[in-house]
Image (spheres, rainbow, N blue to C red):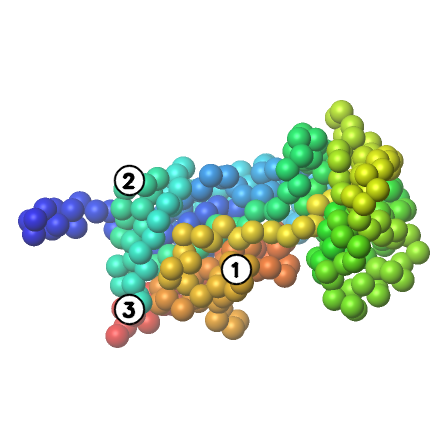
Amino acid sequence: MYEDYHIIQKHMEKVECLIIGSGPAGYTAAIYAARADMKPVLYEGLQPGGQLTITTDVENYPGYPDGIMGPEMMENFKKQAVRLGADVRFGMITSVVFNKDGFNHRVTVDGTTEIECETVIISTGASAKWLNIPSEQKLNGSGVSACAVCDGFFYRGEDVAIVGAGDTAAEEASYLSKICNKVYMLVRKDEMRASKAMQHRVNSLDNVEILYNTETDEVLGDMTVEGVRVINNKTQEKSEIPIKGFFVAIGHKPNTDIFKDYLTMDDSGYIITHSDSSKTDIPGVFACGDAQDKIYRQAVTAAGSGCMAALDAERYLSMRDAE
């Protein structure tokens, strides 16, 4: 048994910098880590490129004056990381073992292969919560969106609807009210969960109409959104509202479940990092992007935090080697 253990140790792949997850945060971390000669290995996960691969036009990322398609942007990120020396692999990290002393972290790929890591950068992102109705998925990217800040621009001057009752929904309704003709806010209960300040804000907006006790029955349209059929859950009365954009703001779930036994997280599962840093409570483990950011959730901020994580990992290794 002792000899078998050492054979396993001898043949286990050892990586200086392992990046879990792709998207703007992961690929940017790979670019900076590669330039620092850390020989990064990046596993793309179930959705290579992250949430931007299901986004059509990206208009708000600097450097693209004419805009760019989300999948094309992520392919550009990947090509740049590979050109600089990152080893980008298709596969999913299914479990981890993080050591509190900061040495010899281990991850398992696709439930079979173990890798030993000197540093780990987590960029697993977050997934939007959906209503799980067929028409919502069919029209996702063609009028249905989970990010008003990302996609609201495309519905300038149009009528739109937003589903949700919390601070995020109220904030996005307020944002949409500035660029859209009319905003219908669909609230399932007879009151909102948003803070009083956010409720006062949306209630004061002339072009925001809040429909309480209202649930989505179906998003209407064949190729693009043309309307939404709603149902009053008290009277069971159904009605149709003509709209061009349908926004879902019922929250996000960070993809961090496999780390919960090792890292400090908030009640929603977002990884808590040290102030002004990507460092977690485990030495040598860093987090960036939507896995730790529940406030901004933008491609450009995710990319910036990926840069931070790579720089933090490089400094960590340099300081450890100097000891």
Q: Is residue 133 above or below residue 36?
A: above
| Tag count | 3
Q: Tag 2 or tag 3, which sits nearer the N-term?
A: 3
In the visual, does 298 lie left or right of 266?
right
In the visual, does 81 lie left or right of 120?
right
Residue occupying image coordinates x 76% and y 25%: 222
- Mark 2 lies on a secondary structure that is loop
Mark 2 Cα-neighbour bin, 10 Å: few <14, some 14–19, many ≥20: few
Mark 3 Cα-neighbour bin, 10 Å: few <14, some 14–19, many ≥20: few
- Mark 3 lies on a secondary structure that is loop
Q: Residue furthest front?
A: 235
Q: Tag 1 or tag 2, which sits nearer the N-term?
A: 2
- Is 64 or 98 nearer to us in this picture? 98
Residue 232 in view (yes/no): yes
* Closer to the eye: label 3 or 2: 2
Q: Using the image, tell me which numbered label, if any, was put on residue 166.
A: none
Residue type of the residue flagged with mark 3 = Asp
Residue 44: quarter of image:
top left
* Label 1, label 3: how far apart the Cα atoms are: 23 Å
Residue type of the residue flagged with mark 2 = Thr
Residue linked to disc 1: 270
Q: Is residue 191 above or below residue 140?
A: below
Residue linked to disc 3: 101
Residue linked to disc 2: 112
Residue type of the residue flagged with mark 1 = Tyr
